Amino acid sequence: MMLPRGSILIVASHNPGKVREIKALLGPHGIEPLGAKELGLPEPEETGATFAANAELKARAAADAGGHPALADDSGLWVDALDGAPGIYSARWAGPTKDFGVAMARVEQDLLEKKARNFSAKFVCALSVAMPQGEAKIFEGEIHGRLTFPPRGHRGFGYDPIFIADGFEQTFGEIDPHVKNAMSHRARAFEKLLHSGILAESN
């Protein structure tokens, strides 16, 4: 499996923030990324029990429907004191309107109800690259940190305003997006993808 320069790659996500991040990561590799929404592709139901299973499910669906290789991401917030929740349900906690203010409030409420003192958490990302009617590969990355409330910053998306990575004082919602993109869970999974040789070397 290899994507030469000039290849079209479907980014199998309807989340504009996620598509923007993935396009930025793909930029130096001569790949032409197209969002699934731009192509009018439906969002498949995420029935997998893990991030990796859901990423592969989405990548295969987009590749088969769109006729081009596809890259899908399944990622979320894992909170230690909540036994890993919201986990693979991270997006669903935001409800049908994708209101992450609601999701972050639920995380805080659940921690309060548990009288949790441990606010350690991590972001997990699984990337899957799938060929139309063909093979798929999975790459995973994590970044560890802690949660803070109330949410701070408007520069990220999802749960970024409540997550502070180890070694930082600002949330992912406050730091420069270029800094976040260079060290996030998605960047770490993407680094493994790069080392796989699937993408052409960057200039």
Image (spheres, rainbow, N blue to C red):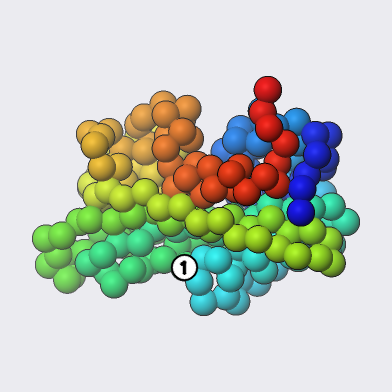
Percent x, y for residue 54? 59, 68
In front here: 66 or 202? 202
Query: With 93 as the anchor, is 3 left or right in this view?
Result: right
The residue under label 1 is which amino acid type? Tyr
Q: Which residue is label 1 attached to?
A: 89
Would you say 112 lies left or right of 21 here?
left
Task: Kindly give the residue lying farthest to the top in the view shown.
Answer: 203
The residue at 75%/65% (across/down) is: 135
Depicted 189 relative to depicted 88: above or below: above
Percent across and percent down for residue 108 are 25, 58
Query: The N terminus appears in which quarter of the rendering?
Result: bottom right
Look at the numbered disc 1 and give the secondary structure of its residue. helix
Q: Is residue 118 left or right of residue 90?
A: left
Q: Residue furthest right?
A: 67
Image point 77% across, 48% down: which residue? 2
Residue at point 75%, 31% (across, down): 30
Q: Position of residue 69 (x, y in %)?
A: 79, 53
Q: Residues within 10 Å of mark 1 (few under 14, many from 20)?
A: some
Task: Compare residues 6 and 160 and report the one nearer the observer.
Answer: 6
Give the quadrant of residue 29: top right
- Residue 157: tell me if it is visible: no
Task: State the count of labels.
Answer: 1
Give the position of the C terminus as an image quadrant: top right
10 and 15: which is toward the camera:
10
Confirm whether residue 60 shows in the render. Answer: yes
Instruction: Identify the image quadrant of residue 28.
Output: top right
Q: Is residue 19 left or right of residue 36?
A: left
Image position, residue 86 (x, y; %): 38, 66
Residue at 80% from the left image edge and 34% from the top image edge: 5
